[in-house]
Amino acid sequence: MNVTIYQYPGCSNCRRALKFLRQQEIPFESIDISLTAPGREQLLMMLQAYGGQLKKLFNTSGQKYRQLALKDRLPRMSTDEALALLASNGMLVKRPFVLWSEGALLGFKESEWRQQLLGGNDR
């Protein structure tokens, strides 16, 4: 399993997610989302995994989201516009943002991660 996790070092959920991956001995590549945002291809994979729910990809509690007034603007944006915005600034992306060949996860909920990454079982 090749797991890629886009995370922000200052994010407590990201730190918990990294700890989980280490404890379960799941190999991963960690990318600082503030330096490198997921690209369009990765964003499309996540969008598909979350049933086309574009808002789920956004860090709606982040300062940048509020500064850009995306609560009001997002409903009027096309998918292409929204993905371009996300790809241009990783701080707009919900994190941790995790992809692997069999799936994708947004945010850190340990029970969901166990189910998706371990099939509900500890290693």
Image: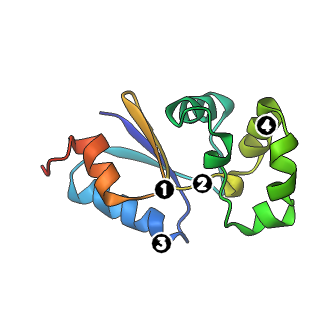
Measuring 83% from the left and 35% from the top, which residue is drawn there? Answer: 81
Distance from label 1 to label 2 (Cα)?
A: 7 Å
Q: Determine the secondary structure under disc 1.
A: loop
Tag nearer the camera, 3 or 2: 2
Mark 3 and mark 4: Cα distance apart in space:
26 Å
Tag 1 residue: 107
Lower sequence index among marks 3 and 1 = 3
Residue ID for mark 4: 84
Q: Is residue 66 left or right of residue 107?
A: right
Q: Which residue is mark 2?
A: 94
Separation (CA) of disc 3 from disc 2: 13 Å
- Which residue is under mark 3? 12
Q: Secondary structure at mark 4?
A: helix
Q: What SS does tag 3 mark?
A: helix
Residue at the location (12% across, 49% down)? 123
Alpha carbon separation for disc pair 4 and 2: 15 Å
